[in-house]
Amino acid sequence: MKALVTGAAGFVGSHLCEGLLAEGHEVRGVDCFLPYYPRSTKEANLAGARGHSSFEFHEADLVTADLAPLLDGIDCVFHQAAQAGVRTSWGEDFRIYSDNNVYATQRLLEACKGSGGPGRFVYASSSSVYGDSEDLPVSEFSPTRPVSPYGVTKLAAEHLAWLYWKNYEVPTVSLRYFTVYGPRQRPDMAFHRFISAALGGDTVSLYGDGSQSRDFTFVADIVAANIAAATADAVGRSFNIGGGTRATVNEVLETVGRIVGNPVPVTRHDVQKGDVRHTAADTSAARSALGFAPAVGLEEGLSRHANSLKDSA
């Protein structure tokens, strides 16, 4: 298989590139290095893939680039590229999200339609599409009511993926990721900040009382779900991809402190707009259709994450 991975220099994208290469696939990566966090961090993410003979990289913006050369000869598109961040998606910055999460996805889907297009289009969606759902765990039949502009853009792009399947038979599959963590996690994300603080970094700002909970998913399990979605009989569908380990933020802080050997210094603040209270994924549909089963529990995943930050310090 020859795969196109968008957002290849990002957290999930870089791991996916390496996972595909390890299985013997050819990979064409693309990224435009959005300045949400330092380019040097993203370049470091790419280091493993760049050293592989079956990897090629293109710096391009999906909002403006000629997409035909990127798609030439591609069997499967893994669309990971997006503007990240729930709390920063309000106000004037919403245009960045609508361009990079919605319009870029529409352009890519449009370029994939017609004969000769890729045999599969796997879209990276988000648990943010559910908002503050009262269904726990949420299934794919639970209402989708995002409570942040970011969540709105991820759901809009998911709807685009489905309608291009319905109207043009672009073979799309959407994966709704639940709170992904692991080595190379974005520096603004909670686990990265918690571990860095416990290792002697700055005090962490914690929004809310810490009793909010998430279904945490290790990045290797996300990679496995993507690779499975490339060939499974699952087109036109959306799937929850969760780690099967729901924990409160306070429990995570305690676990990080135990693993690192130092408590996580925190200052507590009010809950931010767009933050949901709890998430939990019903992954039975993914188990049935994709053969998905999370393999890395929270304690093991946090240990791997902490070791990666220690090694890079």
Image (cartoon, grey):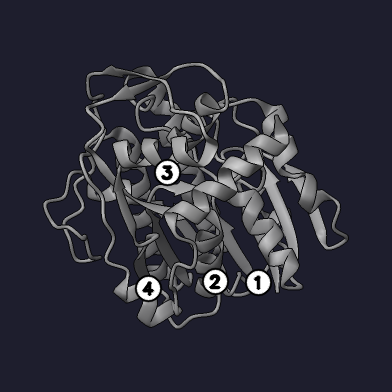
Q: Which residue is mark 1?
A: 75
Residue at the image point whose x is 51% and y is 53% from the top:
301
Q: What residue does disc 2 label?
A: 120
Work out which residue is located at the far left of the displayed protein and give it. 134
Q: Which residue is mark 4?
A: 286
N-term-proximal mark, 3 vs 4: 3
Q: Measured along the vertical axis of the image, is residue 44 above or below residue 21?
A: above
Q: Earlier in the sequence, mark 2 or mark 4?
A: 2
Upstream in the sequence, badge 1 or badge 4?
A: 1
**Circle nearer the N terminus (3, 1):** 1
Residue 114 seen in the figure: no
Q: Which mark is residue 92?
A: none
Real-space CA distance between mark 1 and mark 4, rounded to the nearest whole angstrom: 22 Å
Q: Which residue is mark 3?
A: 102
Question: Which of pointers 2 and 4 indicates the residue nearer the eye?
Answer: 4
The type of residue carrying mark 2 is Arg
The answer to whether the residue labelled 2 contacts the one labelled 1, judged by CB atoms less than 8 Å apart, is yes
User: Regarding mark 2 in the picture, which secondary structure is present there?
Assistant: strand
Residue type (three-letter) at the residue carrying disc 3 = Val
Amino acid type of the residue tagged 4 in the rendering: Ala
Q: Of helix, strand and loop, which one carries label 1?
A: loop
